Image (spheres, grey):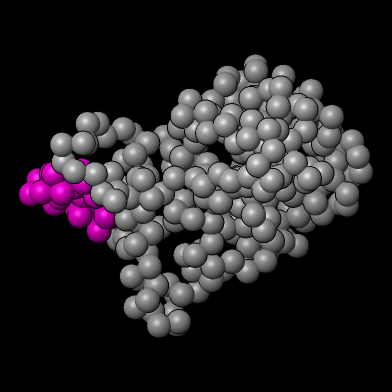
């Protein structure tokens, strides 16, 4: 139920961004419907990503339109200015309604004490930090029976001791799984081209535990996912703490050593831009 005007006290930067993303999605959907399944707008919506074909308008919740076209953004800006000038109270009311409906939904599978602890810590992290720029799926579940965290089909966090003991470890891994969604939703090349391009710069990669993932393709993909994780975590907790966090993980040791090496920063940054995955320009 929408809050009454008297109940609306403040409009935070995070709430404003959530509102903008929601309106952005609504405008994009209207454009999508007008294409009737044909034309360039439809082709951009249903695009090939590094992990297969993805419906960019419906996958991953509200934060899935960072690549919106300029005319659409201008429409959004004009609409916001109109409401700010003519109907400020209505604008604030809409803001509160959309913000309330755009929150991440965190659930537990079994309701055990460990699952509830992880759920509580994740909710606390969302309050402590503005994680909006890195939320690509809204549905999150905690499952103590999961061997490891994973991103699909539903982002699932496990209850390993390191996550129960350290909110930084929990935050880092949570971002990691969100970035798997980012790569699927927003990545430009095909899966084969994506991995082949990364291999050009990192031909001597290591696979298998604890160095990398189970095979070559997944290890190459994780170079980008883990770098995104490192960059975002650095913005939140500082680069030194972020580097300490990723280099003390007992898995993907070669991958994390590679992305944490400052000598690789230039090429990794260029790959993010090439693949359409650079978020720092949009959030600055």
**Residue 102 visible to an observer of this rendering:** yes
State whether residue 168 is above or below residue 217. Answer: above
Q: Position of residue 279 (x, y in %)?
A: 51, 42
Residue 265 placement, left or right of 15: right
Residue 92 location (% of width, % of height): 20, 43
Q: What percent of the width, then of the height, locates residue 180?
A: 65, 49
| Residue located 82% across and 44% down the image | 147
Residue 78 colored in magenta in the image: yes
Instruction: Give x and y (percent) for residue 222.
Output: 75, 45
Q: Does residue 93 lie above or below 263 as drawn?
A: below
Magenta: main secondary structure: helix
Residue 230 visible to the viewer: no
Disc tally is: 0
State which quadrant residue 255 falls in: top right
**Residue that sits furthest to the left in the current view:** 86
In terms of depth relative to the viewer, which is nearer, 72 or 124? 124
Residue at the far top: name it.
Answer: 240
Q: Tell me which segment is drawn in magenta.
A: 74-95
Apparent side of residue 252 relative to residue 4 in the rendered image (left or right): right
* Residue 233, quarter of the rendered image: top right
Q: Is residue 193 left or right of residue 103?
A: right
Quarter containing the C terminus: top left
In the rendered image, which quarter is residue 251 located in? top right
Residue that appears at 31% across and 40% down? 16
Residue drawn at x 52%, y 33% as measured from the top left: 123
**Measuring 16% from the left and 41% from the top, which residue is drawn there?**
5
Foreground residue, 115 or 238?
115
In the image, is residue 284 part of the stretch drawn in magenta? no
């Amino acid at each position: 139920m929408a809050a009454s005007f008297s109940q609306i006290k403040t409009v935070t930067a995070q709430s404003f961004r959530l509102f903008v993303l929601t309106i952005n999605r609504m405008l994009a959907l209207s454009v999508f419907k007008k294409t009737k399944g044909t034309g360039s707008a439809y082709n951009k919506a249903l695009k090939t990503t590094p992990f297969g074909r993805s419906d960019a308008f419906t996958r991953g919740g509200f934060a899935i339109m960072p690549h919106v076209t300029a005319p659409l953004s201008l429409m959004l800006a004009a609409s916001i200015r109109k409401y700010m000038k003519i109907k400020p109270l209505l604008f604030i009311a809409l803001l509160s309604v959309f913000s309330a409906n755009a929150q991440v939904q965190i659930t537990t599978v079994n309701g055990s004490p460990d699952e509830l602890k992880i759920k509580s810590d994740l909710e606390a992290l969302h309050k402590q930090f503005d994680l909006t720029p890195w939320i690509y799926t809204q549905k999150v579940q905690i499952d103590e029976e999961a061997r490891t965290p994973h991103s699909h089909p539903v982002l699932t966090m496990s209850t390993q001791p390191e996550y129960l003991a350290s909110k930084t470890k929990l935050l880092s891994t949570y971002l990691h799984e969100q970035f798997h969604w980012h790569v699927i939703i927003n990545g430009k090349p095909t899966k084969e081209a994506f991995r082949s391009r990364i291999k050009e710069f990192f031909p001597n990669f290591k696979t298998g535990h604890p160095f990398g993932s189970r095979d070559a393709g997944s290890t190459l993909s994780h170079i980008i996912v883990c770098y995104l994780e490192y960059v975002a975590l650095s913005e939140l907790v500082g680069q030194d703490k972020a580097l300490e966090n990723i280099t003390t993980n007992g898995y993907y040791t070669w991958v994390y050593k590679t992305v944490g090496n400052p000598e690789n920063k230039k090429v990794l940054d260029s790959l993010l831009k090439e693949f359409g995955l650079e978020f720092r320009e949009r959030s600055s």
